[in-house]
Amino acid sequence: MYKAVFIDVDGTLIRSDHSISAATFNIIQKLKEKNILVVLVSARPLSGIEPIAEKTGLLNNPIASLNGAYIASGGKIIFEAKIDIDITNRVHEELQKYNATTIYYQQGLWFSEVQNFNTDHEQKITSVPVIIQPFNQTLQYWRINNTGPNKLMVISEEIIIKEIQDNLKQRFMIDLDIYTSKPTFLEVMNKKASKANAVKLLIDLYNITREETIAVGDNFNDKEMIEFAGTGIAMGNAPDEVKAVADYITDTNNNDGVSKALEKMLNI
């Protein structure tokens, strides 16, 4: 018997036009009626997930944001993982070699040195305004407040992202998890932060076993979560590498893949 369902947002829960289908909305309500814990797990910051959680009636449930680096429930922080600011500074220096936009996410704040198409696109999914300032000012802010970023996101052309990923992995693989959430987005995280770790932490908190969980996702940052869950579901729009680790492959996000999979798995 399943007791928890963990669902990615972009490319999974929502369609390409950022809408939630009636079928997806209805399946979430059925899960709630059955007292099955539903958790949104996303690379987005919390402010970018909360409007979706509100629309689906999940605002009071745990929400795992920033790929599991920041987990909150009802306004209370459950877990937070930061990247050491000296390591962040070294990563920043490496990124200066490339034509890329870097965004630094820290709890409810996000920073960038430039405002461009990439930051404007990200601004559309979060109500918190981006802080545009030189990186040294952001670094100084973190030092004064004894804090740091939960996630770095690097945006560029696919070929450049692959080069950056290879470089950063070679230099920082001991301290950081570095993977793509889409071919043009590179996510840089503390080793303690991942969607799979978010699932582990929350099921321990709710006394739920691994076998009692379902995880649904569509991209490389969902891969470990899909592998870890009792039943891992890959979307029809997922890369082959992600589909390969799934127990079940459903339809695409634009064709009600989430609702079709959960109806099948839960017989509802």
Image (cartoon, rainbow, N blue to C red):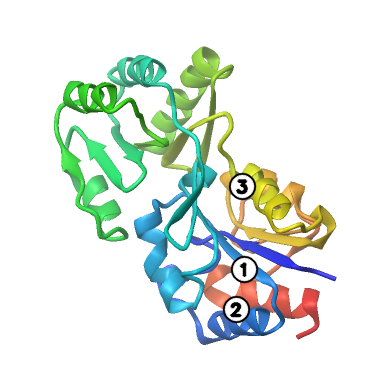
Which residue is depicted at the point 47% across and 18% down? 167
Residue 118 vs residue 5: left or right? left
Q: Amino acid at mark 3?
A: Ala
Do the CB atoms of the residues marked 1 and 2 lie less than 8 Å apart? yes
Q: Which mark is residue 198?
A: 3
Q: What x and y, as percent, mark residue 91?
A: 38, 19
Q: Marks 2/3: CA distance?
A: 20 Å
- In this rendering, is residue 28 above or below 223? below
Q: Residue 28: give its label.
A: 2
Is 254 or 140 nearer to us in this picture?
A: 140
Q: Nearer the viewer, residue 198 or 204?
A: 204
Q: Name the quadrant containing residue 88.
A: top left
User: Of marks 1 and 2, which one's residue comes earlier in the chain?
Assistant: 2
The answer to whether residue 83 is above or below residue 221 is above
Displayed quadrant of residue 143: top left
Q: How many marks?
A: 3
- Residue 87 image point, x, y percent: 41, 17
| Residue type, numbered disc 2 | Ile
Seen at 54% across and 60% down, the residue is 62
Q: Residue at x 18, y 41 (%)?
A: 131
Q: Which element carries disc 3, helix, strand or loop?
A: helix
Quadrant (top left, top right, bottom left, bottom right) of the N terminus? bottom right
Q: Kindly indicate the quadrant of the structure image that contains residue 185.
A: top left
Q: Position of residue 253 (x, y in %)?
A: 55, 69
Regarding residue 119, the answer to whether it shows in the image is yes
Residue assigned mark 1: 38
